[in-house]
Amino acid sequence: MESFTLVREGMRIEFNVPIKTRSGRIVRANIFHPLEEGKYPVIFNYGIYGKDLHFQDGYPDVYERIRKNVPDYFVNTTGTHHCWEILDPEKWCKDGYVIARIDSKGTGQSEGYMDPYCHEEAEDVCDCIEYFAAQPWCNGKVGMSGTSYHSVTMWNAASLQPEHLTAFCAWEGHTDIYRDNLRHGGILSSFQSIWFKKQPSLVQNGRGKRGYTSRVTGLPVSGDKDLTDSELAANRISMSDVTSAKENELITDWHRGQSADVTKIKAAYIAVVNWGGQGLHMRGSVDAFVHGGSKNKYMLAISGPHGDLYFSDKSVNLQKKFFGYYLKGEDTGWDKMPPVTMRVRKVGEPAFSDKHEYRSENEFPLARTQYTKFYLDCSNYGLTTDVPTAKGTITYKGMSSDGVTFMSQPLEKETEITGYIASKLFISADTNDADLFVTVRAFAPDMKEVVFSGANAENIPVAIGWLRASHRKLDPEKTTEFRPYHTHDELWPLKPGEIAEMDVEVWPTNIVLPKGYRIAVTIKGKDHVYTGYIPLNYQLKSKYDEDVPQRIDGLGPMRHTDPIDRPPEIFDNNVTLHFDEDKRPYIMLPIIPAK
């Protein structure tokens, strides 16, 4: 595919610019320039979704949702260059930025073997950063911005410390492919193989005329070559085979090579966290802020459907304030920004509203957190801050029951829960393993469950955690009282009938519950399902699952149903919770007093 230049929409656009990487690969970029010549900072993304695929053509249902939720996305732009999860160049070039989009290797116009998240992609990103910095039209400052996969490539590349990466905004990404994405507590999530089939595979390089057509250039989004299905399959990784393979149940070099060491990051960054991103993008974003090595790091915590807020003018203006300060040296006031800006979720609020409360904080987790143990009481299925005296056991069936729920009395005052959550359980099982799904829930005085519009589903609970019993080994250096950290480097099988101690990591969350509401914890051996009536979620139905039922799993496509990973003869067993003087199971919640 030859490169060419067009002048349109008030920009000079170079299409399919070849960038040679250290491996000799060529990746191709679309570069959007201001019309006036000069030296400008560059903001780019490197991604797997097709730089030439218009948002509306690839994701029509989500595009219409954005039209409804974020109408300002369509103001002061023709929308010609709208693209999934990245910046609209029309809103940036006019303010003195060069915007670039790069097809990752094996996708769109970039040839090569398609291997999402791999270490070679991180190296490609570093090479692209240095390419841009060396151009005569660049001021030597390079930034990155994007959502989801584009954020993952930022974290991975930034940890390699490219010299000219100055600042980046990673919106809802992950940093640890094993713990954040593929295996929750050691339990395989089916999302990755579904995602790979429904999204990246449809823009693999070599689909030619069988694939999408660019509405801007009229050319095939996935290059000129028309490969057969077998040729395409041979030129990409089999994501379902790799993720479900038993040899990858524990952390391997493959996982480590596709994850970021955020402690090594030097560039300034914004880590955007979605409180509703349980099961994919939230855990790693929090960790990137908490453990990131940069002296100039910021955390923005939001809520609502995945990526929607990224397209709003509020996001654009926030990023311009950030990039203006770091890439242009402008006095935007960013130096006065607090390290943490977080949405405070309250019951009954819509996913999008100008009245949402955002609060500034100096750190995360919050220094004033009161970590409070809510004990599970076997005598009355209660949840109480008083240590129970009852002894006994409760048994449930792993995969074919709804487990057991423990509920508090009505709260005596308004209560905020914000931060990391830990749970300690004592269990035995009939077989040598068990999967624990621990869900933190909330209920109104009328016993209606409190749910939220999440990143990938419409009705999600407060928080969820997972642990496979054989993965219970803890890393003593990284484990804290409020956050267990599992090594996933060796299996510790259960001995049938013997009691074992389980420390379950429940993902961070935020919620303010009014007086009179109740907190509950459900423990079961399968995915949480919201049992209230849910209209069909059009995003999930169109992208991930043709047969979404009226009951939708609590995390949408982040399900744990792989028969290779979860054979019923092992995991549909009797699991027994134990309660005794020296075995007092609890959920530790981060209670936040008012400032």
Image (cartoon, grey):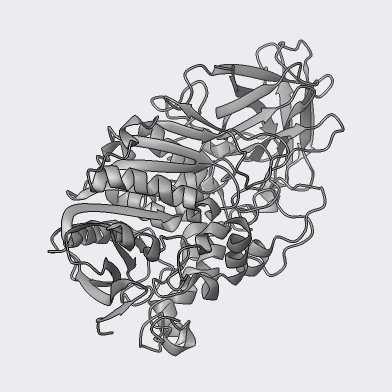
Question: Which residue is at the front of the view, 353 or 590?
Answer: 353
Tell me if residue 334 comes above or below residue 306 in the rendering.
Answer: above
| Residue at 31 percent of width and 75 percent of height | 110
Residue 139: name its quadrant: bottom left
| Residue at 45 percent of width and 55 percent of height | 147
Assign the N terminus to one quadrant of the image: bottom left
Question: Which residue is at the front of the view, 457 or 340?
Answer: 340
Residue 254 visible in the displayed image:
no
Q: Where in the figure is residue 239, as x and y percent of width and height?
A: 47, 64
In-image side of 63 versus 106 (left or right): right
| Residue at 59 percent of width and 17 percent of height | 594
Number of numbered callouts drawn: 0
Tell me if residue 323 comes above or below residue 538 in the rendering.
Answer: above
Question: Which residue is at the front of the view, 330 or 83?
Answer: 330
In-image side of 104 versus 531 (left or right): left
Q: Where in the figure is residue 380, as x and y percent of width and height?
A: 84, 21
Residue 376 visible in the displayed image:
yes
| Residue at 57 percent of width and 40 percent of height | 275
Q: Where in the figure is residue 508, as x and y percent of width and height?
A: 55, 34
Q: Where in the figure is residue 499, as x and y percent of width and height?
A: 65, 26
Question: Which residue is at the front of the view, 133 or 569?
Answer: 133
Tell me if residue 14 comes above or below residue 311 in the rendering.
Answer: below
Of all residues shown, which one is farthest toward the right? 446
Assign the C terminus to one quadrant of the image: top right
